[in-house]
């Protein structure tokens, strides 16, 4: 090998060694580790928070005890009704529930309903004839109901087409039949549960037949949560949920300010108005009369007030305007037994003088005629027995308790002994005698289902009777013998003593046809073979002379003005009750809340949450 070749090989070898060393020393590039997958995006539930000042005693829309704006809201959004009021308040067939409803016979008078075959409860049972039967049977047999007159005239409810068609037979033509069978309840769940009419509905509604269902009732936190009913067969609700939240005036104002509350419907009053004043133009407010008039029901079948002269004397002693001004200054004064002050055609029917306005001289004359005498100390007695009355209000109904205390103060000042009691509302309006529980400022009693704070109704589950299950016993059932003595003005009572209330602070439902309303509130139907013992009114009133007038008004398509005037005149003379005032809500909304909901009063019969299934979530 030549020198040149040898040098070439050495150079090439050196280069190869250099390259090999370079490759050996270079770091090996590793592939980049995979990036973790981003967490799934959880959509925030769309909701509207509605501020309220009370959840109410329970949620049965057919019970006096449960009458409240929250119960009205739940009935509107959760329970099926054959007819519903439109924006003007006129009834329209709800075709999501029934495809047709019409009079199909006049002898006997029969209304036939063809039910939507898709309509079903969230428990997966169909909305069917048995739900009509259940509501009819409860309304005609249970005490303390609202607008029961029409159901008393139903003699039979017949099922066809596997329960998806219903024939309702009446004992006479009943022109107001469209107002019946609203707020249907799930018979399959409730019909065999003891005390279901009251107890099972104190903690919520066990099934839904509307666009929302009750997901939870948390009385400890003061919330009712409605969520979209995913089994609803018609147009689904836009929102995921609507939360009704109990708030005091200051907390409500702060919630509206920071955006935790979108709209509200508290009872209108100075405390609320003052608390909201600081929000200025950030909110809008408007009054909205409620479909409830507060009355004093005067017991007519027992005790001192069974004498009409004593009832009239009590009416003459009470200053109704002072009571309203002290308890509900923004409420509308009520001076009629039929129409409420906010209704078209309302006119005061109270006679001049007492009991329209206080008249102590007339009261003294009436009590003297009834055999009472007034001692040197100013106290009224009958012989050696003091004139003593029991004034009662439902424990869960705060405004009613305030009214009872105001009434007691005025009567005591007039020389009458008064004991104020506050039993559970369900007991007060359904039982002849109640435990003489004094009013308290602590949390009112709740049903076992909500005692732990939260109650979540489970579709299809058998309901549990609450503490007022015994309240389903008709008023004609003998009750525990009431105590015949009253506590001294201090209000102390013996433990477990029972009393019959002489004066009951009672909510009166308004907004329906006036004839059936008067007959429901003040009538006493005769026993029939199918109903030998009709339930008595909470105050025991029954007027044989007035009953034919009430029945005629209830059966009329258009009530006769002369008969209406006669009914009002007799009621003021007999005084089974004393009208006080129509309650008023204050509708409050933030700008985003108003834009998303169009929050307003709604029809009197369905209230401010009418149409909430079409609300959208507010955008800040």
Image: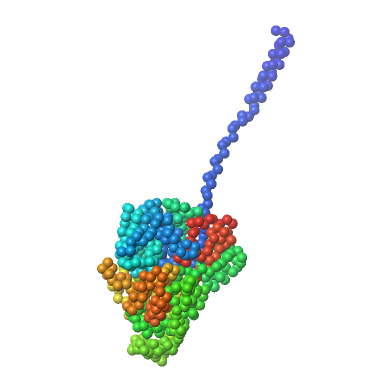
Q: Nearer the viewer, residue 398 or 241?
A: 241
| Total number of numbered discs in the rendering | 0
Residue 135 locus on image (x, y percent): 35, 62
Q: Is residue 616 left or right of residue 371?
A: right
Residue 111 seen in the figure: yes
Residue at 43% across, 70% down = 510
Residue at 61% across, 65% down = 281
Q: Is residue 505 above or below residue 377?
A: above
Q: Nearer the viewer, residue 538 or 553?
A: 553
Residue 16 locus on image (x, y percent): 67, 19
Q: Is residue 182 left or right of residue 22?
A: left
Residue 524 locus on image (x, y percent): 33, 73
The single residue placed furthest to the left in the displayed view is 529
Residue at 54% across, 44% down = 39
Q: Is residue 210 above or below residue 34?
A: below
Residue at 53% across, 46% down = 41
Residue 251 seen in the figure: no
Quarter containing the N terminus: top right
The single residue placed furthest to the top in the displayed view is 1
């Amino acid at each position: 090998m030549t020198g040149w070749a040898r040098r070439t090989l050495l150079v090439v070898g050196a280069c190869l060694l250099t390259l090999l060393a370079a490759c050996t020393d270079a770091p090996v590039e590793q592939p980049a580790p995979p990036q973790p997958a981003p967490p799934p995006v959880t959509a925030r539930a769309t909701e509207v928070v509605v501020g309220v000042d009370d959840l109410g005693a329970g949620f049965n829309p057919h019970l006096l005890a449960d009458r409240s704006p929250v119960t009205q809201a739940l009935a509107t959004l959760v329970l099926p009704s054959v007819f519903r009021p439109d924006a003007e308040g006129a009834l329209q067939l709800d075709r999501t529930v029934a495809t047709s409803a019409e009079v199909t016979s006049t002898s006997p008078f029969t209304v036939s309903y063809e039910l939507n075959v898709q309509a079903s409860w969230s428990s997966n049972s169909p909305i069917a004839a048995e739900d009509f039967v259940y509501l009819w049977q409860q309304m005609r047999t249970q005490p303390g109901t609202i607008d029961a007159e029409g159901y008393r005239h139903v003699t039979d409810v017949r099922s066809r087409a596997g329960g998806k068609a219903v024939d309702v037979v009446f004992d006479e033509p009943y022109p107001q039949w469209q107002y019946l069978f609203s707020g249907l309840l799930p018979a399959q769940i409730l019909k065999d549960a003891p005390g279901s009419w009251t107890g099972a509905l104190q903690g919520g509604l066990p099934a839904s037949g509307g666009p929302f269902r009750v997901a939870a009732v948390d009385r400890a936190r003061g919330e009712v949560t409605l969520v979209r009913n995913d089994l609803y067969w018609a147009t689904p609700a836009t929102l995921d949920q609507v939360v009704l939240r109990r708030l005091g005036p200051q907390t409500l104002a702060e919630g509206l300010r920071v955006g935790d509350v979108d709209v509200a419907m508290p009872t209108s009053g100075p405390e609320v108005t003052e608390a909201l004043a600081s929000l200025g133009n950030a909110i809008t407010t408007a009054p909205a009369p409620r479909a409830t008039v507060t009355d004093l029901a005067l017991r007519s079948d027992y005790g001192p007030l069974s004498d009409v002269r004593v009832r009239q004397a009590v009416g003459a002693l009470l200053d109704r305007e002072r009571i309203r001004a002290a308890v509900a200054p923004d409420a509308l004064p009520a001076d009629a037994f039929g129409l409420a002050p906010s209704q078209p055609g309302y006119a005061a029917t109270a006679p001049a003088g007492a009991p329209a306005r206080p008249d102590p001289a007339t009261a003294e004359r009436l009590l003297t005629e009834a055999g009472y005498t007034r001692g040197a100390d100013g106290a009224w007695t009958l012989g050696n027995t003091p004139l003593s009355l029991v004034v009662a209000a439902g424990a869960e109904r705060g405004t009613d308790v305030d009214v009872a205390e105001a009434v007691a103060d005025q009567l005591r000042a007039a020389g009458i002994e008064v004991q104020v009691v506050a039993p559970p509302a369900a007991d007060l309006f359904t039982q002849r005698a109640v435990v003489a529980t004094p009013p308290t400022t602590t949390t009112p009693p709740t049903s076992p289902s909500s005692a732990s704070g939260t109650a979540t109704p489970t579709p299809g589950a058998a309901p549990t009777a609450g503490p007022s299950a015994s309240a389903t016993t008709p008023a004609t059932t003998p009750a525990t013998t009431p105590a015949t003595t009253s506590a001294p003005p201090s209000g102390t009572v013996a433990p477990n003593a029972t009393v019959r209330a002489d004066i009951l602070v009672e909510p009166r439902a308004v907004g329906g046809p006036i004839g059936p309303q008067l007959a429901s509130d003040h009538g006493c139907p005769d026993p029939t073979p199918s109903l030998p013992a009709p339930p008595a009114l909470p105050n025991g009133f029954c007027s044989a002379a007035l009953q034919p007038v009430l029945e005629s008004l209830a059966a009329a398509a258009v009530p006769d003005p002369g008969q209406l005037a006669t009914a009002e005149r007799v009621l003021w003379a007999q005084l089974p009750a004393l009208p006080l005032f129509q309650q008023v809500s204050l509708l409050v909304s933030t700008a985003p809340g108003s834009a998303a909901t169009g929050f307003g009063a709604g029809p009197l019969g369905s209230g401010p949450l009418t149409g909430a299934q079409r609300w959208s979530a507010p955008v800040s």
